[in-house]
């Protein structure tokens, strides 16, 4: 069973920076696309940034230019660095990954448990 474990959330002042990381536990599987999503109170979960296995990235317009997603395939870890944080960035951030086991015919989507990011004004 694959688990995604996030770390790095917390409280930060507006204009500050924060780094998140998410490591996949387990072995014997392949990880394809990975990403970060967030959900603010009363709102739907939205994509923040995604990265393919080969390193192609995609960002939400709201974080474009302020965020960098990266991954270390050997460590089965994805990272998100966010700069110039704004109060509207406050949300629970979730790690996402498509994982395929050795006998599976297609990748399965996994989610982390979420980590709270709060940006104070």
Image (cartoon, helix red, strand yellow):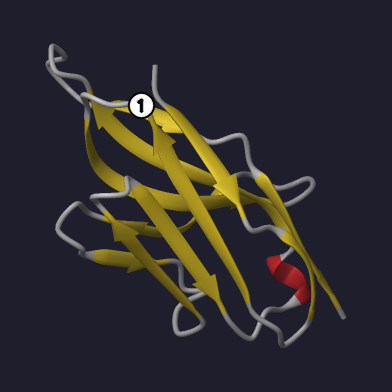
Along the line of sight, the residue nearer the viewer: 59 or 22: 22
* Residue farthest top in this picture: 103
- Dividing the picture into quadrants, the one containing residue 83 is bottom right
Q: Residue at x 21, y 64 (%)?
A: 56
Residue wearing tag 1: 26
**Coordinates of residue 97 in the picture (x, y in percent):** 36, 39
**Coordinates of residue 94 in the picture (x, y in percent):** 56, 45
**Coordinates of residue 54 in the picture (x, y in percent):** 14, 58
The number of discs equals: 1
Along the line of sight, the residue nearer the viewer: 51 or 59: 51
Left or right: 97 in relation to 31: right
Which SS class for mark 1? loop
**Coordinates of residue 55 in the picture (x, y in percent):** 20, 63
Residue 119, above or below 100: below
Left or right: 33 in relation to 40: left
- At label 1, counting other C-alpha atoms closer than 10 Å, the crowd grade (few under 14, some 14-19, many 20 or more) is few
Quarter occupied by the N terminus: top left
Quarter occupied by the C terminus: bottom right
- Dividing the picture into quadrants, the one containing residue 32 is top left
Residue 76, above or below 54: above
Left or right: 119 in relation to 104: right
Residue 68, above or below 83: above
Along the line of sight, the residue nearer the viewer: 52 or 29: 29
Q: Residue at x 22, y 54 (%)?
A: 52
Q: Residue at x 51, y 82 (%)?
A: 66
- Dividing the picture into quadrants, the one containing residue 58 is bottom left
């Amino acid at each position: 069973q694959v688990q995604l474990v996030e770390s790095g959330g917390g409280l930060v002042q507006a204009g500050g920076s924060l780094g998140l990381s998410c490591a996949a536990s387990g072995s014997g599987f392949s990880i394809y696309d990975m990403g970060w999503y967030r959900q603010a109170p009363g709102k739907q979960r939205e994509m923040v940034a995604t990265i393919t296995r080969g390193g192609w990235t995609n960002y939400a317009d709201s974080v474009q230019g302020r965020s960098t997603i990266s991954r270390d395939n050997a460590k089965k870890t994805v990272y998100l660095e966010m700069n110039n944080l704004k109060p509207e960035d406050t949300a629970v951030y979730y790690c996402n990954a498509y994982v395929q086991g050795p006998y599976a015919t297609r990748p399965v989507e996994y989610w982390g448990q979420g980590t709270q990011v709060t940006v104070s004004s």
